[in-house]
């Protein structure tokens, strides 16, 4: 579903990403790992269209994508759950979910029932403002909002950040269920090693804006992956 070849990215005169290669397949979780500042979030911004890449090739479903902007990629089925959630605090839960309608034809402007099957608490809070939710509830809302567009590619940036353990477990179950549905590729950026390793089908370790190593999980033990994570 996603092919990235030789991706470079700059912020002004500073180069952040250097020739990054990445493949993410449908029905699999591709996890990008590394310490703060190695370029993980910048990579998702480049893939999702919120920051232009300065070099390299990006393909979605085999189609080469030029310098498409975020809303154009969303219409192609690329959904982003950004770091920090970025829900609209003054809009209700319903209104936050309905923002996803902008990517869909009018005939599909409805909130699917399976959103509430994944996140039952949202059904009870439909008229509550997003800013009044807890951090964990906001994260559930952010993921649910991304699912409204029926994504082919789901990008998740640090979904466990600042979240209580019981919600982390629920989010892990949701990611597993989405993978099992087999209709989307999932790219997960995460620093919580155990969460990432347990979910991942493929592990990408980044260091200083480059891919240090990439492995299918079957090729590397938990201990070897943890050691690489600490080094990266």
Image: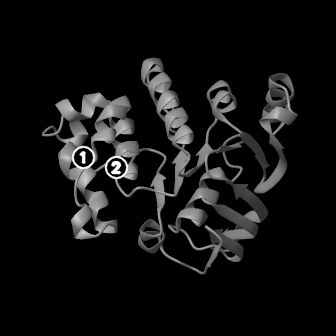
Q: Nearer the viewer, residue 174 or 4?
A: 174
Q: Is residue 180 above or below residue 98?
A: above
Looking at the rendered image, the quarter that the C terminus falls into is top right
Report x, y in % for residue 161.
Answer: 50, 34
Looking at the rendered image, the quarter that the N terminus falls into is bottom right
* Secondary structure of the residue carrying numbered label 2: helix
Q: Nearer the viewer, residue 223 or 8?
A: 223
Mark on residue 89? 1
Q: Nearer the viewer, residue 178 or 220?
A: 178
Please state if 14 lies on the left or on the right of 222 as rendered: left
Q: Nearer the viewer, residue 25 or 132?
A: 25
Report x, y in % for residue 209.
Answer: 75, 56
Mark on residue 145? 2
Dot 2, how many residues are within 10 Å of its Cα: few (below 14), some (14-19), or many (20+)?
Answer: many
Dot 1, how many residues are within 10 Å of its Cα: few (below 14), some (14-19), or many (20+)?
Answer: some
Q: Is residue 71 above or below residue 151?
A: below
Report x, y in % for residue 84.
Answer: 44, 44
The residue lying at 47 percent from left, 50 percent from top is 82
Please state if 108 lies on the left or on the right of 197 as rendered: left
Q: Is residue 100 visible?
A: yes
* Secondary structure of the residue carrying numbered label 1: loop
């Amino acid at each position: 579903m996603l092919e990235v070849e030789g991706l470079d990215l700059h912020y002004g005169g500073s180069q952040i990403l250097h020739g990054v290669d990445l493949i993410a397949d449908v029905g699999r979780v591709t996890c990008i790992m590394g310490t703060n500042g190695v370029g993980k979030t910048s990579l998702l911004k480049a893939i999702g269209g919120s920051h232009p890449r300065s070099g390299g090739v990006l393909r979605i479903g085999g189609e080469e994508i030029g310098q498409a902007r975020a809303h154009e990629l969303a219409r192609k089925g690329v959904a982003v759950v950004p770091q920090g959630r970025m829900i609209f605090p003054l809009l209700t839960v319903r209104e936050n979910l309905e923002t996803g309608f902008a990517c869909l034809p009018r005939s599909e402007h409805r909130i699917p029932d399976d959103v509430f099957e994944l996140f039952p608490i949202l059904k009870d809070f439909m008229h509550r403002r997003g800013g009044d939710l807890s951090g964990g509830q906001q994260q559930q809302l952010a993921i649910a909002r991304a699912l409204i567009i029926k994504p082919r590619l789901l990008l998740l940036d640090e979904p466990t950040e600042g979240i209580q353990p019981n919600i982390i477990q629920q989010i892990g179950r949701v990611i597993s269920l989405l993978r099992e549905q087999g209709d989307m590729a999932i790219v997960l950026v995460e620093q919580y090693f155990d969460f990432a390793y347990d979910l991942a089908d493929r592990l990408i370790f980044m260091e200083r804006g480059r891919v240090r190593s990439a492995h299918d999980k079957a090729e590397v033990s938990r201990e070897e992956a943890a050691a690489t994570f600490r080094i990266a």
